[in-house]
């Protein structure tokens, strides 16, 4: 019995598969030599078709008004796809979209997949682009109706036949093996890049077709984390663009997760890759400031972060800043009114309290600031190195910059200034300072406080 292939193309309203709808579907059944059956239909979506989709495909609300819904054609689609190898250009998008909508119609669908982008890269290597339009132009394949399901599916069928004819190394057979690891990868990422990834802590870089870094991530296990980007059935426009833009992956290993976290933050800050968004919004919003008022009281207040005025301590959000101020007033008997966080019960009960005496009150403030300064002073974090004969050191100077590197196991690090010269220095950031300060509090046995002139 011949192996049958279902060559598929769909048009959608865009967006996520859960909120987006299919507007057109074409399925061509191929027996390995020719197309033996065709199915094509417009589909009436549950939502209005966005204008930009209509401009691209020519499919608008009026055109699909009298077409069946997907639920009405789901059984036919399922019967055509069942027991076939699912083939598409950038297969994971079409496959995931159809799998989701078939499930919503009561059909459990699972099938082996072939991606004509990945196959083309291996069987016709060296091309500038492997988009359907470009690969068809290179191979002189006519696309009768571009960006319509029928036209794109017909062109993909011709391309697939050429791939079958030129597959002298049995690449298609190899990719269909369950342990090949090919089926879930982005269309333009060579599997060899993934095979080189270590199972160690570090950072990884996704590169686009020109080698530019488009995403940087941190991992305890680099290979496992990179693979996780490509699994799952969540299909959004942003994720599809992201996966389509990945052409290569590289990495840097570090002996500890903390060093990897720091290295990730430094690398992101240096280049702000296209798809890294979380750290871009992470910066100091509020600060702890002090000033002497007209009555000679040393006032501590929370204010908006200002680059021209260095705060005593920085905060990412107002809630965290106010919580810190409340803790400070309770621990060191400071006046909530002078700190602008509420009424002072001490002053209400005792008009002659210490809060009314500038000299005495300022001693409380100085005590609080001295205690807090111990937390934010410079320090080393010592941890394991890349091998048994060394250890790693991270030097932290909150609000300024830091350095990290490796020293031989028997090194003397009592002279902080000399040791720092042996480490690689970096410009710091609020995020890195917060990250390392938090780590130091949670792992005090690894912390060595220092004084650097």
Image: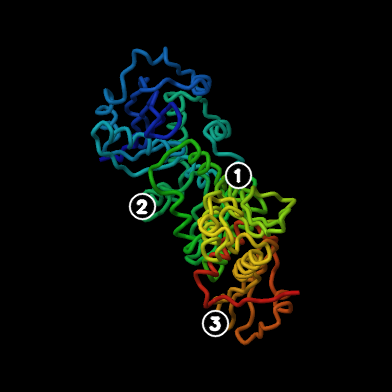
Please tell me which residue is depicted at 46% across the width and 23% down the height of the picture.
Answer: 148
Whichever of callouts 2 and 1 sits on the residue coming sooner in the sequence is: 2
Question: Residue tagged by mark 3?
Answer: 388
Which residue is nearer to you in this view: 106 or 125?
106
Determine whether label 2 and label 3 are within 8 Å by CB: no
Whichever of callouts 1 and 3 sits on the residue coming sooner in the sequence is: 1
Q: How far from the left and from the top, in percent, is residue 207?
A: 59, 49
Please tell me which residue is depicted at 47% across the width and 34% down the height of the picture.
Answer: 159
Which residue is nearer to you in this view: 84 or 215?
215
Question: Is residue 255 in sight in this rendering?
Answer: yes
Q: How many marks?
A: 3
Q: Secondary structure at mark 2?
A: loop
Question: Residue tagged by mark 2?
Answer: 177
Residue 214: which disc? none
Q: How far from the left and from the top, in percent, is residue 173?
A: 38, 49
Q: Quadrant of the N terminus?
A: top left
Please tell me which residue is depicted at 65% across the width and 62% down the height of the picture.
Answer: 357
Q: Is 21 situated above or below 224?
A: above
Mark 2 and mark 1: Cα distance apart in space: 34 Å
Question: Residue tagged by mark 1?
Answer: 274
Q: Is 79 situated above or below 288?
A: above
Whichever of callouts 2 and 3 sits on the residue coming sooner in the sequence is: 2
Q: Quadrant of the C terminus?
A: bottom right
- Dot 3: within a 10 Å radius of its alpha carbon, few (fewer than 14), some, or many (20 or more) residues? few
Q: Is 329 situated above or below 42?
A: below
Is residue 245 toward the left or the right of residue 75 in the image? right
């Amino acid at each position: 019995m011949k192996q049958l292939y279902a060559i598929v193309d769909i048009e959608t309203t865009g967006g996520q598969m859960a909120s987006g709808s299919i507007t057109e579907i074409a399925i061509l059944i191929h027996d390995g030599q020719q197309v033996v059956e065709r199915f094509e239909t417009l589909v009436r979506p549950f939502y209005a078709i966005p204008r930009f989709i209509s401009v691209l495909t020519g499919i608008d609300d009026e055109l699909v008004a009298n077409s069946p819904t997907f639920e009405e054609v789901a059984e036919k689609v399922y019967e055509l796809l069942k027991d076939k190898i699912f083939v598409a250009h950038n297969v994971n998008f079409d496959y995931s979209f159809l799998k989701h909508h078939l499930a919503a119609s009561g059909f459990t669908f699972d099938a082996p997949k072939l991606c004509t982008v990945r196959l083309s890269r291996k069987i016709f290597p060296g091309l500038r682009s492997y988009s359907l339009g470009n690969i068809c132009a290179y191979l002189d394949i006519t696309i009768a109706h571009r960006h319509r399901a029928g036209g794109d599916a017909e062109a993909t069928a011709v391309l697939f036949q050429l791939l079958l004819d030129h597959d002298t190394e049995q690449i298609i057979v190899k990719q269909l093996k369950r342990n090949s690891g090919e089926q879930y990868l982005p269309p333009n990422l060579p599997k060899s890049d993934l095979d080189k990834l270590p199972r160690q802590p570090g950072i990884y870089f996704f590169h686009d077709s020109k080698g530019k870094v488009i995403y940087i991530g941190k991992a305890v296990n680099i290979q496992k984390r990179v693979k996780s980007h490509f699994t799952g059935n969540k299909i959004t426009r942003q994720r599809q663009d992201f996966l389509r833009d990945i052409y290569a992956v590289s990495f840097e290993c570090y002996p500890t997760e903390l060093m990897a976290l720091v290295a990730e933050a430094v690398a992101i800050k240096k280049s702000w890759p296209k798809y890294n968004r979380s750290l871009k919004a992470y910066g100091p919003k509020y600060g702890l400031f002090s000033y002497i008022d007209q009555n000679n009281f040393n006032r501590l207040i929370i204010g908006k972060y200002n680059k021209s005025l260095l705060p005593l301590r920085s905060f990412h959000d107002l809630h965290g800043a106010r919580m810190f101020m409340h803790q400070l007033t309770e621990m060191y008997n400071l006046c909530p009114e002078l700190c602008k966080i509420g009424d002072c019960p001490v002053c209400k009960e005792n008009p002659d309290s210490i809060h009314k005496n500038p000299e005495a009150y300022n001693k409380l403030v100085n005590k609080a600031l001295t205690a807090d300064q111990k937390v934010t002073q410079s320090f080393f974090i010592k941890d394991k190195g890349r091998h048994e004969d060394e250890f790693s050191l991270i030097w932290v100077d909150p609000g300024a910059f830091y350095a990290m590197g490796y020293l031989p196991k028997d090194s003397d690090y009592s002279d902080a200034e000399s040791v720092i010269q042996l480490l690689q220095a970096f410009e710091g950031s609020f995020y890195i300072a917060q990250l390392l300060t938090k780590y130091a509090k949670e792992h005090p046995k690894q912390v060595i406080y220092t004084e650097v002139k």
